[in-house]
Image (cartoon, helix red, strand yellow):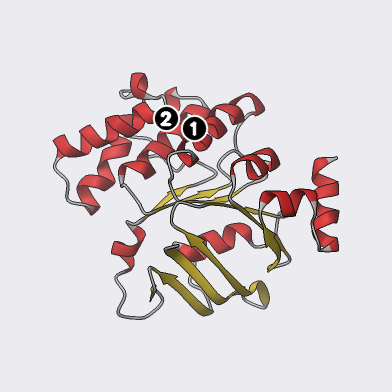
Amino acid sequence: MERIIEIKHLNKSFGDNEVLKDINFHVNKGEVVSIIGSSGSGKSTLLRCINLLEKPNGGEILYKGKNILDSDHDVYAYRAKLGMVFQQFNLFNNHNALSNCTVSQIKVLKRSKEEAETIAMKYLRTVGMEQYINARPRQLSGGQKQRVAIARALSMEPDVMLFDEPTSALDPEMVGEVLAVMKDLANTGLTMLVVTHEMEFARDVSDRVVFMDKGVIAEEGTPEQIFNNPKEERTKEFLRRILS
């Protein structure tokens, strides 16, 4: 199996607060890996370290076998290979849905406007937003904004999609529409790393589940292992609390 991302002995501190402690794990091509755990366990920080929005204090992040923390690595070229979907959508408010999905393609990938629009339309259709191409973010619901954000990330045609709690800012009735899009994407063989509170998604869609607690990976395994037969007491305690 081709390893797209491999994390070795990763550490991250903010001042005296050690948020990530000796993290080791990997993501294979075509895999869906969900990261679960309580708020403050380090899940989002791990994702932000992987795409270098935060700089780790130590360890290695290997992308296709090369350590992207080496000083000679092109950070921007690497970032272009990772699609990132944030909790708060992070859309450009002064651009419509179509333009939100073309601007990075044109700037970063140097695609022509025509090519960028063709690719953007393909992915706006994929997420069911093709009829809203002229709408600005303020005219869209939270669920629609997040679907545009997913289309924007897909338009860069990345090797890996990173999702940072993509449903946590949504009203409950909109969570389903975003999860349905993510489920469809998982079925296409897209490589996905998902930080989520949605246990049903983690259980039904993931190939592997990583449980984080207090800055460490406490346990990882198949959804079957983690949800039906967790070994660690703290995994059991977390699932008892969240599933009750």
Q: Determine which quarter of the picture holds residue 219.
A: bottom right
Identify which amino acid the numbered label 2 is placed on.
Val
> What is the crowding at mark 1: few (fewer than 14 residues within 10 Å), some, or many (at least 20)?
some
Residue 224 visible to an observer of this rendering? yes
Tell me the SS state at disc 2.
loop
As helix, strand or loop, the secondary structure at mark 1 comes to helix
Q: Which mark is residue 181?
A: 1
Q: Tell me the amino acid under the disc marked 1.
A: Val
For marks 1 and 2 on the same chain, the one whose residue lies earlier in the sequence: 2
Q: Quadrant of residue 225?
A: bottom right
In this picture, residue 160 sits left or right of residue 208: left
Residue at horizontal 13%, vertical 42%?
112
**What residue is pinned by disc 2?**
127
C-alpha separation, residue under disc 1 versus residue under disc 2: 6 Å
Quadrant into which the N terminus falls: bottom left
Examine the rendering and report whether any part of residue 52 can be seen.
Answer: no
Judge by depth and name the residue closer to the eye, 217 or 86. Answer: 217
* Residue at x 41%, y 33% (from the top left corner): 148
Q: Residue furthest front?
A: 1
Residue drawn 34% across and 57% down?
Answer: 81
Q: Residues within 10 Å of mark 2 (few under 14, many from 20)?
A: many
